[in-house]
Image (cartoon, helix red, strand yellow):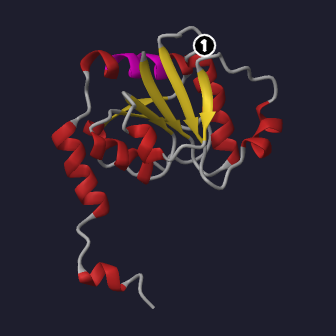
Amino acid sequence: MLFGSVTPSIGRSRTVELVRKVAEAFRNTAGIRVIIKLHPSMRIEYLQPYLGKVELPAHVSFSAEPVGELLTKSNVLVYNDGTFPSAEALAFGVPVVFVEPEHGLSLDSLDGFPQVRSVARTPAQILEAVQNDLATGSGHDEDGLAAVRQLVGPVTPGVLSLFED
């Protein structure tokens, strides 16, 4: 079985938007197990009232497992904002699919690296992008690692000093 991870942003409205789109996109794809990893500050109990009547298929669930552990068994990552889950995925060689927001600004840190990610907006586009990445095994390896190096940069004594007292 293929394994996909989904990492919504810290914001409630964007999280709800992504969970709804993912539930619809993967409704009839039992061959892909989808795990949604909420931001550590977002609790499912807090989110549930805002999901309304969204029903997750049996093969779509939430996990408290750390993102790094999920990525070791993921074939693809679907995300909607932020830097680290997408950069971590690229470092693991896992293809990434960025889901653009319906409203508001896109806050994708990989925006300057269009060659390292697929982009989708609708549930149908999400499914198509995921299936394409799974079929091609596209992890965008060299370009992805170059993007990660640019985003994260080397950890030098000067960088470390920024975080010291």
Q: Is residue 133 left or right of residue 78?
A: left
Q: How many marks?
A: 1
Instruction: Please determine whether, in this image, residue 43 is positioned above or below residue 79.
Output: below
Instruction: Please determine whether, in this image, residue 27 is positioned above or below residue 20.
Output: above
Say which quadrant the C terminus sits in: bottom left
For the point 27% across and 53% down, the residue is: 148
Q: Mark 1 sits on what residue?
A: 27
Q: Is residue 142 left or right of residue 95?
A: left
User: For the residue marked with disc 1, what is the amino acid?
Assistant: Arg
- Numbered range of the magenta stretch: 125-132
Crowd tier of the residue under label 1, counting other residues whose Cα lies within 10 Å: few below 14, some 14–19, many 20 or above:
some
Closest to the observer, 18 or 61: 61
Instruction: Please determine whether, in this image, residue 43 is positioned above or below residue 128.
Output: below
Prevailing secondary structure of the magenta residues: helix
Asked whether residue 75 is drawn in magenta, I would say: no
Position in image of residue 73 (x %, y %):
39, 32
For the point 61% across and 53% down, the residue is: 40
- Under circle 1, the secondary element is loop
**Can residue 110 be seen here?**
no
Judged from this view, the residue extending furthest toward the left is: 142
**Can residue 32 be seen here?**
yes
Position in image of residue 66 (x %, y %):
50, 47
Closest to the observer, 118 or 33: 33
Say which quadrant the N terminus sits in: top left
Position in image of residue 120 (x %, y %):
46, 28
